[in-house]
Image (cartoon, rainbow, N blue to C red):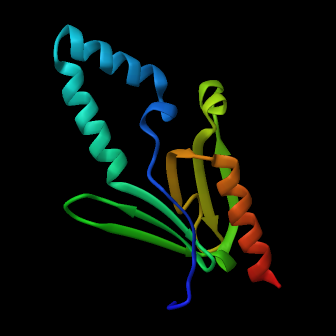
Amino acid sequence: MMSEQVLYESHPSMFAGNPILFILSILLCFAYGVGVIILVIWWLRCRGEKLIITDERIIKKEGILGRRENIIYHSDVRNIQVKQGLLQRMFGVGSIGIATSGIAGVEIEINAIPNLMKVRNLIDEQRRIMDR
């Protein structure tokens, strides 16, 4: 693992992931101040979640005070699911779910990931390299 190279690292995107909620929160800041609380909580949740793709594995880290990590090696990836709504497609973000053969369903899921198709293609490319 010493020579492991990070290929992609990102937190979920606040604005691009849900632009309508973001704009509504900004408007609520001016109107009632409630939007500030919504934005701070939302920002903390985004900062507390991270997707890291290396040349060997996919890592999802969660938490600010406590920490949780979920790791999948590229050779174990069996399915990649991507989901994008219309606005998410316009901003190039979306949700990605990664499944392995050992678990029924999705093992890692993360929303509002920037450069969604780049991430999917990167995982596919690394999976093909590991299958050789």
User: Between 92 and 73, which is closer to the camera in this rendering?
Assistant: 92
Q: Residue 123: where, in percent of width, then height?
A: 68, 65
- Relative to 37, 78 lies left or right: right
Residue at 59% in and 54% down: 97
Residue 75 to residue 13: above or below: below
Residue at 55% in and 89% down: 3
- Relative to 115, 33 lies left or right: left
Q: Residue furthest top?
A: 31
Q: Residue 43: where, in percent of width, then height?
A: 31, 40
Residue 31 to residue 81: above or below: above
Q: For residue 5, what is the image quadrant?
A: bottom right
Residue 94 to residue 63: above or below: above
Q: For residue 128, what is the image quadrant?
A: bottom right
Q: How many marks?
A: 0
Residue 70 to residue 112: above or below: below
Q: Residue 49: where, in percent of width, then height?
A: 38, 55
